[in-house]
Image (cartoon, helix red, strand yellow):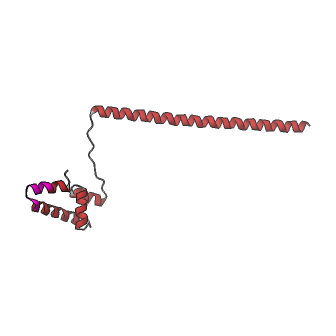
Amino acid sequence: MTSYDELKELFEKRDKLDLFEKKVEETCLVVMRQTNYDKEKALEKLKQHNMAAIDVVKEYMGVPLKHEKKAVTTNQAVFREFRTFLDEACNNYQRQKEIKERRELQRRIYIQRLAAMQKEKEKLETIKED
């Protein structure tokens, strides 16, 4: 779609600026009837949505605007899927590595606690023997 300024230039070149202004006015009135926008706000929103009254009303009502997806070639789609697969594999590897490191750390802490408890037990036994 063309923007407001591009349309205005096109109509100026053809000496039909009055027709352009009339159509903009009509479109603003359509938006104003469907929303509670004033003329300035309606014109601003029309410029923002490339003079598409339907898009302005949809935005006002909270309907999500559908954006056309860019057509991709088969090669682009294949590489995108390949990249996605590799990213997922890398993320899974990193998660598994972190889990393994946490388990190893917990195992070391457990062994240290057992060793400390065993030393404490040996101290108590030597005290009892004396």
Quadrant of image for the C terminus: top right
Q: Main secondary structure of the magenta part?
A: helix
Residue 35 rendering spot, x and y as whole percentages: 25, 65
Of residues 109 and 6, which is closer to you in this image?
A: 6
Residue 12 belongs to the span the image colors magenta: yes
Residue sitting at x 22%, y 67%: 39
Left or right of 32 in this view: 125: right
Residue 72 belongs to the span the image colors magenta: no
Residue most toward the right?
A: 130
Residue 69 rendering spot, x and y as whole percentages: 27, 43
Residue 118 rendering spot, x and y as whole percentages: 78, 35
Residue 121 occupies quadrant: top right
Residue sitting at x 37%, y 32%: 82
In the displayed structure, 7 sits above or below 30; it is above
Left or right of 64 in this view: 86: right
Residue sitting at x 11%, y 60%: 17
Magenta stretch, residue numbers? 9-17
Residue 40 rendering spot, x and y as whole percentages: 24, 66
Residue 122 occupies quadrant: top right
Left or right of 32 in this view: 20: left
Residue sitting at x 10%, y 62%: 18
